[in-house]
């Protein structure tokens, strides 16, 4: 659940910033780059600020049932 929410938030941020870059100001692409850099950083360090934020809001990882 937590990983799906993180991917959803990142994707939403990217799409919104792209729309803002097209219709408002090209400098919104810096926000797109910021999201991309954070995704890359979290893949390398195994630490994600958005994960910490979402956990404080009560969103946790689901435990998958063990199939026998």
Image: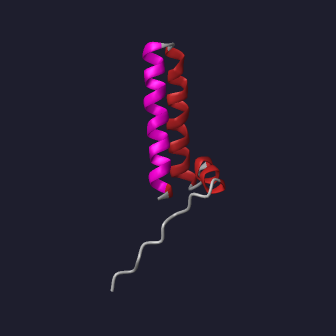
Between 10 and 60, the one lying in front of the other is: 60
What range is drawn magenta here? 3-23
Between 26 and 54, the one lying in front of the other is: 54
In the depicted structure, whether residue 21 falls above or below residue 54? above
State left or right for residue 39 relative to residue 15: right
- Residue, far bottom: 68
Q: Quadrant of residue 34?
A: top right
17 inside magenta stretch: yes
Number of marks drawn:
0
> Image point 39% across, 80% down: which residue?
66
The C terminus sits in image quarter: bottom left
11 inside magenta stretch: yes
In the depicted structure, whether residue 2 falls above or below residue 9? below
In the depicted structure, whether residue 8 falls above or below residue 35? below
> Image point 46% across, 32% down: which residue?
14
Q: Position of residue 8 (x, y in %)?
A: 45, 44
> Image point 49% across, 34% down: which residue?
13
Q: Position of residue 38 (x, y in %)?
A: 55, 41
Main SS class of the magenta portion in the image: helix
């Amino acid at each position: 659940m937590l990983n799906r929410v993180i991917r959803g938030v990142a994707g939403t941020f990217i799409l919104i910033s792209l729309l803002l870059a097209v219709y408002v100001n090209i400098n919104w692409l810096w926000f797109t780059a910021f999201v991309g850099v954070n995704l890359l950083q979290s893949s390398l360090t195994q630490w994600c600020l958005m994960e910490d934020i979402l956990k404080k809001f009560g969103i946790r990882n689901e435990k998958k049932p063990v199939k026998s």
